[in-house]
Every structure is written in structure tokens, then in C-alpha cells.
Image (cartoon, rainbow, N blue to C red):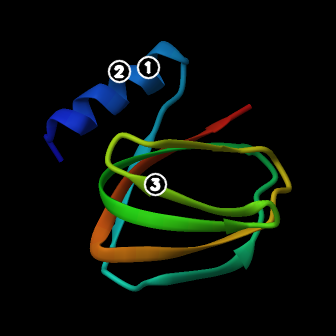
Amino acid sequence: MTSEQAVVAAKVFAAEGLTPHAWSNEAGYRYGEHSHDFHKVLICIQGSIAFHTPNGDVVLRSGDRLDLPPGTKHSATVGEAGVTCMEAPRS
């Protein structure tokens, strides 16, 4: 992954002292409802993904960021073009 957006995102994570990993999914992939015991920092690199939270839906596109506090229940649906994201836990 060498897109300009990936380079920008990597700099954001580095500036915050975070070590991200990248992942991708095909169009229409769905994540069932779950939560994490850590603060999740996620930046969309390419494509789109909709996160479904108790406070409503949040659609991320290239360059958008989402911070999920620990214990936040969420599910997600990948957009029409698939998605690539980078994420890292914040302790």
C-alpha cells in the first residue's frame, strides 16, 4: 500500500505514537456488532465503510478518521468499491 493517503495516515499515526496495521475487505462485507476493550483509531485509506453505532451511522471515505472509545458497540458495512483502512489501538 503506497497511496498518498496511506503515507499521510502513517504520518498521523506516527505523530500520535501509534503503530497501525492495514486491512482491506471486498464490497458489501459486513462486520457483526461487537466492541473492543481499547480505544480504536481508524483512518480510511481507499473506498468506503459505514460504521453503525448506537448514536447513528458514520460513513468513512478516503482520508476520514474514526475514534471509537473502549466498549463502544458497533457494526460495519463495506461500501461498493471495497475498503482499505489503517488502524491502531490507543492505550
Looking at the picture, how far across and down is residue 4, in whole percent? 16, 34
- Estimate the spatial distance between the alpha carbons at disc 3 and disc 2, rounded to whole Å: 19 Å
Where is 12 relative to 9, above or below? above
| Rendering quarter of residue 88 | top right
Q: Which residue is mark 1?
A: 14
Instruction: Determine contact: label 1, label 2, CB under 8 Å.
Output: yes
* Label 1: few (<14), some (14–19) or many (≥20) C-alpha neighbours in 10 Å: few
Which secondary structure, mark 3? Answer: strand
Whole-number angstrom distance, CA of label 3 to CA of label 1 = 21 Å
Question: In the image, which disc is placed on residue 64?
Answer: none
Q: Quadrant of residue 72?
A: bottom right
Name the amino acid, label 3.
Leu
Q: Which mark is residue 60?
A: 3
Instruction: Give the label, 3 or 1, closer to the camera.
Output: 3
Frontmost of labels 3 and 2 is 3
Label 1 vs label 2: CA separation?
5 Å
Is residue 8 shown above or below 39? above
Residue pictured at 39% horizontal, 85% vertical? 28
- Identify residue for label 2: 11
Position of 39 with respect to 16 (left or right) is right
**Image point 42% across, 23% down: which residue?**
12
Mark 2, Cα crowd under 10 Å, few <14 / some 14-19 / many 20+, is few
